[in-house]
Amino acid sequence: MIEHLIRTLRAVSMQKEPFPYFFAKNVFPDDYYQELLAHLPQATDYAPLSEGSVVRPGTYSQRLCIPLEAASLSGLPFHQLLFWSRFADFFRSDRVVSEMVHLFQVEFIQRFGEQNISLQPDLGLISDHSDYAIGPHTDHPQKVLTLLFYFPKDEGQKHLGTSVYEPIDKAFRCEGLRHHPFEGFRKIYSAPFLPNSVFGFFKSDCSFHGVEPL
């Protein structure tokens, strides 16, 4: 699986405007992707993101999450716990992290220079429900890059992916602690919510992205 993923990532076509991002299909081998779908937790296993420490209580209640951490996975059936524990270990491995950083090598050096940076992947399974939306934002200042892996069973919801935005005031920047109204931005691109695909971007003060109301 790792060789398949690395070949896919090395072949991506990086878009540079309005910030570096990419979209790729066939991320995992087909048989592994089918195995992944078979191990997705039940809807009742997810908890609202607002119950954790990521967002303010009472906000984004339509976005549910299972952090890929031992404490959160311990409540799953054993076969799911084992699968997602291995999945998390895979994405926390030095080789995979290194490949992901290499995708944005130029941007990484521009941001951090020659500093010795320690990166800690933050992994979770996300399930969005009706009325979920999140206005254009650039992500938390501590983030370096984001990869959103899409796990639908078919192409019936391909219009529901994350969108890239550009502020109407092109000089506008945000360090990442606020979400902004859609009216102040123009949509540049929407990543299709397709099976076995990934949308990724490098965090900056202009990496505005969001999800319009489902």
Image (cartoon, rainbow, N blue to C red):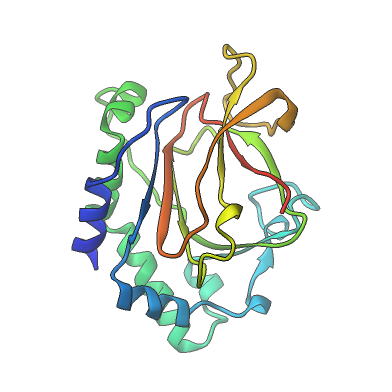
Instruction: Identify the residue at horizontal 44%, vertical 27% (top origin).
Output: 19
Considering every residue shown, the one lying at the far top of the view is 171
Residue 56 in the image, given as x and y percentages of width and height? 74, 47
Residue at 57%, 41% in the rendered image:
163
156 vs 114: above or below: below
* Residue at the spot 37% in from the left edge and 73% down from the top edge: 33
Q: Nearer the viewer, residue 154 or 182?
A: 154
Seen as rendered, the residue at the extreme right is 58
Front residue of 165 and 144 = 165
Residue 67, image x and y in percent?
54, 63
On the image, the x and y values in percent for residue 72 come to 55, 71
Q: Is residue 145 left or right of residue 1?
A: right
* Residue 93 horizontal/vertical position (percent): 27, 58
Looking at the figure, which quarter contains the C terminus? bottom right
Q: Is residue 9 above or below residue 172?
A: below
Which residue is situated farthest in the bottom direction here?
78
